[in-house]
Amino acid sequence: MVGRRERVTAMITSYGAAIRDGFEYLLDNHPDVFTIGQGLWSPWYVGSSMTNLDKQFGVARVIDTPVSELATTGAALGAALCGYRPIVIHPRVDFMLLATDQIVTQAAKWRSMFGGDVSAPVTIRAIINRGGEQGAQHSQALHSWFAHIPGLRVVMPATARDARDLLIASVLNDDPVLYLDDRWLYEEQEEMPAPGPVRLEGQGARVIREGSDVTLVGCGYTTKLCREAAEALATEGISAEVVDLRVLNPLDGETVIQSAAKTNRVVAVDGDWKSCGLAAEILALVAERRSNDTPVRLARITHPDAPAPTSKALERQFYFSATDVATQARRLVG
Amino acid sequence: MVGRRERVTAMITSYGAAIRDGFEYLLDNHPDVFTIGQGLWSPWYVGSSMTNLDKQFGVARVIDTPVSELATTGAALGAALCGYRPIVIHPRVDFMLLATDQIVTQAAKWRSMFGGDVSAPVTIRAIINRGGEQGAQHSQALHSWFAHIPGLRVVMPATARDARDLLIASVLNDDPVLYLDDRWLYEEQEEMPAPGPVRLEGQGARVIREGSDVTLVGCGYTTKLCREAAEALATEGISAEVVDLRVLNPLDGETVIQSAAKTNRVVAVDGDWKSCGLAAEILALVAERRSNDTPVRLARITHPDAPAPTSKALERQFYFSATDVATQARRLVG
Amino acid sequence: MTPAQRAAQGVTDMPASLKDLGTLAEAGAHHADIELPPDPTPFVAALERMILIRAAEERIADACTEGLVKCPAHLAIGQEAPPVGVTMHLRKTDRVFGGHRSHGHFLALTGDLHGLFAETLGKDTGVSRGMGGSMHLMAREHGFYGSVPIVGATIPMAVGAALAAKMDGDGDVAVSYFGDGATEEGSFHESLNLAVMLRAPVLFVCENNLFSSHLHIDLRQPRDSVARFAVANDIPCACIDGNDVVEISRVAGEAIAAMRNGGGPQFLECVTYRWRGHVGPREDEDVGVKRKDDLAVWKRRDPIARLAAALIKAGRIPPRAVEDITRRLQNDIERAWEQAVRDPYPPPAALLERTWSDGGSASRR
Amino acid sequence: MTPAQRAAQGVTDMPASLKDLGTLAEAGAHHADIELPPDPTPFVAALERMILIRAAEERIADACTEGLVKCPAHLAIGQEAPPVGVTMHLRKTDRVFGGHRSHGHFLALTGDLHGLFAETLGKDTGVSRGMGGSMHLMAREHGFYGSVPIVGATIPMAVGAALAAKMDGDGDVAVSYFGDGATEEGSFHESLNLAVMLRAPVLFVCENNLFSSHLHIDLRQPRDSVARFAVANDIPCACIDGNDVVEISRVAGEAIAAMRNGGGPQFLECVTYRWRGHVGPREDEDVGVKRKDDLAVWKRRDPIARLAAALIKAGRIPPRAVEDITRRLQNDIERAWEQAVRDPYPPPAALLERTWSDGGSASRR
Ligand SMILES: Cc1ncc(C[n+]2csc(CCOP(=O)(O)OP(=O)(O)O)c2C)c(N)n1
Ligand SMILES: Cc1ncc(C[n+]2csc(CCOP(=O)(O)OP(=O)(O)O)c2C)c(N)n1
Ligand SMILES: [Mg+2]
Ligand SMILES: [Mg+2]
């Protein structure tokens, strides 16, 4: 946690609990914040990340809804146009796709369509919830899709602290933001100071481990895999730099490009499909800038070209591991 | 039209009329084909591309619908599961986004989720209809989104003949296919033989003009721009090869890679946004394969990072031209 | 259902079919007289506002024909009554949303001719700074929160705006204007239920002009009146003559008052008709097909002529008032139009700068 | 509404609130007796099928507890009557669609224990070859066209399947099973209207178990019965006791017969209750909260016990028939289960090969 000042109140918090801390901070300090979506009156639905917020802040500000993703998202957008900073909850990215129009064609374009002065500060929180034999319709991430859309900010926290702070930053930002957290990270622990205001504008990719032989680029859960792979590689004398993208739109390409300039080798690791995905963007960013210089070695690790399977026998094959990342890195270095 | 055998009945047809010819061929020869969507009982709604099909084949097979994109698409999928080969019509890609769930989470995954043996041969035809000060909600293409999804074939005809033949191929294919045509191409003319059955499996990218100095990669309307740019460049002694992608998913990377191997310079030209888009995929495909060899020079031409504007003053800036393509190609070559 | 049973269900008025509605029933019949309230004063201004809307849209229609307006323009000529009747009960802190056919919604609230004209011309001085055109209008200082052309898209937003108003606690309300076609979108149905459960003070105003583009409602829905969806969701509703601004104002006034007093959503179906094609200026052709004879019938139900006739009969305006008002307004219109034509286009930098809250610095980095 | 008025609207039976329904009204009351038809023979098989469904789901529940079944399993224990009552009138060429809670829909049609068990275990011998798990079942040879967990997703598909049946002209019908929660999705509402306009022979079967996950319908909709949406769309409908298989069979039989004779869509709301949590095997805990006392009440309305009591009373089965049938079926269940446990997983190549019609050659190139 390079460069972070620790306060006296620092404490160890899990990713799931840190999200809840972010909600608590926002609801405590910002009367214009409310949250709406499916499962908010259940202690179970969205993991540990929102437990009892309804009891703490009341059902008027923590609103559970009918099974109506499109209208719920549109209603949050409407409230955002009227001075509020709502956070819509979609317990799975897959469900959120029913609200694609409101997110992509409405919220993302609202400022531009009306001349640049009107803000739509809605935060759409969707949870990547996959694995455990849940199958093809309960496993999508599709962050690449949303990172493709001008006007929509997309953040993807990889650490407990970011889970909290990027949530705060998303809600305080005046643009619509898609905040994607990952259930596979909920038990990650991190020490962090008490919450405070965070500006999203200043946030970009971050080198979370320095290295010289190869750059591993991840976001959300794959950042964790990259970190683990880097640790494994270090024992073999391979020095891997890890870049955590954090904010996928607008994408901070410079940090990746600078790291690539140093290592000349980049593995883009992305928990999504390959074609036209984020990993392609990382490679393109490096390659288009570097095309006059010495060649850089590039590789992608993504999901196989198939819907997520159910059977655990196939899940093992579909979801890659830190070992797979290390193997690919070794190949580039070797 | 390299390699095409002309029949005696060859005639010159426009892109719009060729689409209509495709429908006519399919409805004439395949009793399991029907088409459903908004505007099908209007001579105006979908340009010249479906005029009077309702009168020719009856309203039971050419079905106009309520303004219900999601249910219409789902119903077509349901009919496809029961032995039909429906073609759903969305007069704009923007409207189709309301049916994202049925296309991406249902149709694309149906075969895989149920073990591989069940076909969902639905064709979703959406029209890219932009410019003319229609603004941000009447201008999206988002082919990169759909090309990202395993299980969903995506085709994008650039020529009149492909407009017809790829429609036929899409409908006769046993997978769900997204067929995207572009209103800006409707007046393009091409000589072509009488229609016949076409297999989609055999189709991939095509070198539509050979060259040695630079590769211009396009799809749909941008293929036309690439061709025009290549013609302009030829007058200056620059030999540009043009690759028309035609099928975006599964993407035929080999043709692009081979062309890049020849020219060492690639301009990916895409009428969509940049980040995580098709142009990124083209660059990534070339770069990851070439990373051991001599450097290749790469560039992307895409829309600026903004929603489509309305004012024609800004449309000029948003939509690029063949001149822009040629300028970029010159830069790589120079 | 008897009226009592309807009332028990919270239904103000709902016909089984529009054929049951007196003024609309016999295709060939003339319109019914408009019944003025005891104090008809506000309807003199309402008449003027309806004339303004029509004349402004006629100016835009001409500019379309001349090729000056390039963006798709969906004219509401013939449909001036609903927005004017509803707006009589609104205040600047309310929140109104429209759709693709919203010139009237906008002008009823703002009267801002120049802002509308400049916008349809894509000028930097337009209400959306030339970024939206005819289909994207906004004037928040007047309570107009936006119109966009994706059918049904603003309906849930209006629900959210009403929720915000309820949270504010100042008795403000939201209004959602949409057409009969929009009632076929899932977003509409989800929004009705959500509004009820949130007890959000939103007035759903369906301008049922019997057509969605080229298709008559009989080819799209089992019944020609849509208030039945309000009934299904327990939302108090009325289905009324959408060319009678007095009736619209009366019913809307009651509905809005109930909402300001803490009530939940209300639903108002106004049956009306558009005189021009679905998009663009033509009267004789609609979405590629010849117009039906219906148009002649509906022209005899002209909402402006009917109100004028009632006011003249009541001695509240002189016999040639419509012509006089029109002439006077035409002056304003021409001045506003000429100014809009002279105005500048947005600068090239607008494209990126207007996309993000921080003026596009992020996307340029 | 009087019954006559309801009938005029095509309504078979629709209560203003479920509190009006006799058997469901008083929370503490025992169930009403089931009235057998003159020839109750088919209901002996129906009883057996309901017992099969329950015992099979209990087997799966145990396997969840044991940690053998990993995929999310949504059990329909307590809700066995609707699929069995409806299936009594179906034939193999009909097309049935389900959702996340579809073991019962599947077994009512197929009785295929091994195919279901193997699927929940992710085995290559499962009905979806281990690619789907509990939430993705299919058996087209029996008319089961698929169930998926996106709420409301298969409703429009069933409309399309019905359209296909209509085009085929053989009198086949489609059935769409969904829950009360699904009626909050736009896809549901769009589908009702589309089905009417296409005159598609689809039977919409809403298993209203009063809950969507943790939320009671009173917290999600203004009324606790959803047949009002069918009324709004002019679809003939009935809202009935979903734990009375005889009544379900009677009403479904009429509806399906009407559709086979060329009629359009029909709507059947079956009011019922699930005995286990929203997902997983627990009775005492539901989505993280303690179960309500309601469960005890509903257990006294057990659809199996009620049918058994009526058949015993009518002398059609011996007094201990339920126990005997259960014991016999448990044998089949154990055999099928053990086979499924022994079966192989899908091979690694399945991942790509089963994605495309050409076996993934395209994606590998
Ligand atoms: C989601 C979506 N689908 C289709 C369209 C095409 N479209 C534009 S206006 C319109 C007609 C809508 O009819 P209605 O809601 O009755 O409004 P009216 O035009 O009659 O005012 C349609 C279908 C659209 N803009 N958005
Ligand atoms: C589109 C979508 N939204 C939310 C969910 C989460 N979810 C799964 S089951 C369920 C409950 C649905 O309730 P109902 O339709 O009544 O079916 P029941 O579980 O009662 O059988 C919900 C909300 C989902 N699977 N899909
Ligand atoms: Mg209309
Ligand atoms: Mg339920």
Image (tube, coloured by chain):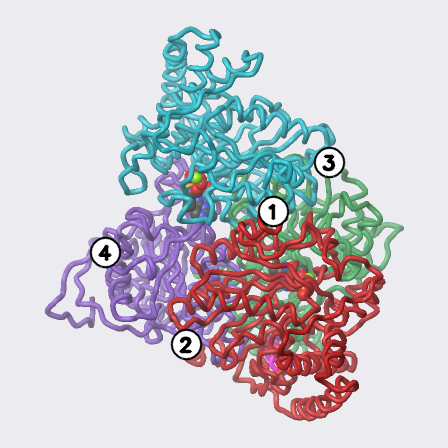
Chain colours: A purple, B green, C red, D cyan
- Residue B316 within the magenta-colored segment of the rendering: yes
Cα separation between marks 3 and 4: 55 Å
Look at mark 4 in the image and give the residue it sits on: A17
> Residue C292: percent from the left, percent from the top?
83, 62
Residue stretch in magenta: B309-319
Which of discs 1 and 4 lies nearer the camera? The answer is 1
- The type of residue carrying mark 1 is Ala
- The type of residue carrying mark 2 is Ala
Q: Are marks 3 and 1 in contact (CB under 8 Å)?
A: no
SS at mark 3? helix
Residue drawn at x 67%, y 74% as measured from the top left: C36
- The type of residue carrying mark 4 is Ala
Look at mark 3 in the image and give the residue it sits on: D167
Look at mark 1 in the image and give the residue it sits on: D232
Which of discs 2 and 4 lies nearer the camera? The answer is 4
For the C terminus of chain B, the quadrant is bottom right
- The type of residue carrying mark 3 is Met
Disc 3: host chain: D
- Residue C54 within the magenta-colored segment of the rendering: no
